[in-house]
Image (tube, helix red, strand yellow):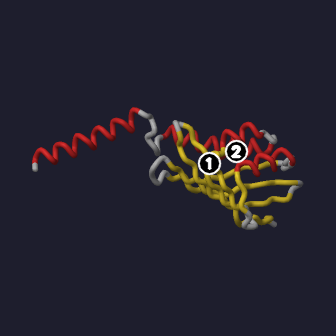
Amino acid sequence: MKNSVILVVVILLTACQYDNSKNDILNSEEDRKTLRYLKEVEWPKAYREQDTVLLDRILGEDFQMIDADGNWSDKKFEIDWLKKNAIAHDSVFYEIKRLDFPANGTAIISGTGHITNDSVKTIYQSSNVLVKRNGVWKAVSSHVSGVRALE
């Protein structure tokens, strides 16, 4: 029995060391900074500047989105849409309200987007699931709801 316990402890320690050596420890301050920058700076920039190369880097190949009207789209659709549609907002920023690391190399980012266009302010709610693959965070799912103009 004692040898079995020691064997289990050795296996667990080895597994932990393996994860650490891959540098995929989640919920680190570095991951938080990276994800905040991705969501607050890079993602809005991609749409604002019609930067399809940047959007391609952010979205995983398996990306799926549900928009505020309940329509589904994928990475190809989003990139094609961005090529054809210039965004002319006066300002856009995203306020992160939740940043969690549930398990298995995933992160959830949820919050409120703020858009100003000709003094009309609009907000929306969104949630995003990202997966860390080979050390790089990729968005795999987004959901947008509650789009409304503020008075």
Camera-side residue of 50 and 97: 50
Residue 51 % position (x, y): 78, 39
Amino acid of disc 2: Trp
Farthest-out residue, top: 21
Q: Residues within 10 Å of mark 1 (few under 14, many from 20)?
A: many
Residue at horizontal 28 percent and vertical 43 percent from the top:
12
Question: Of the residues under marks 1 and 2, which one precedes in the sequence?
Answer: 2
Q: Residue at x 76, y 67 (%)?
A: 69
Where residue 141 sits in the image (x, y, percent)?
A: 62, 54
**Nearer the viewer's eye, disc 1 or disc 2?**
1
Point out the image quarter for the C terminus.
Answer: bottom right
Q: Are marks 1 and 2 in contact (CB under 8 Å)?
A: yes
**What number is the disc on residue 126?**
none
Residue situated furthest left in the rendering: 1
Quadrant position of residue 55: top right
Would residue 50 be found to the left or right of residue 17 on screen? right
- The residue type indicated by label 1 comes to Ala
Q: Nearer the viewer, residue 132 or 33?
A: 132
Name the residue carrying label 1. Answer: 139
Identify the residue under disc 2. 43
Residue at x 52% of width, y 41% of height: 31
All told, the count of numbered labels is 2
Where in the figure is residue 72, as x and y percent of width and height? 71, 61
x and y percentages locating residue 10 in the rendered image: 22, 40
In the image, residue 129 sits, relative to residue 20, either above or below, namely below
Q: Is residue 67 above or below residue 96?
A: below
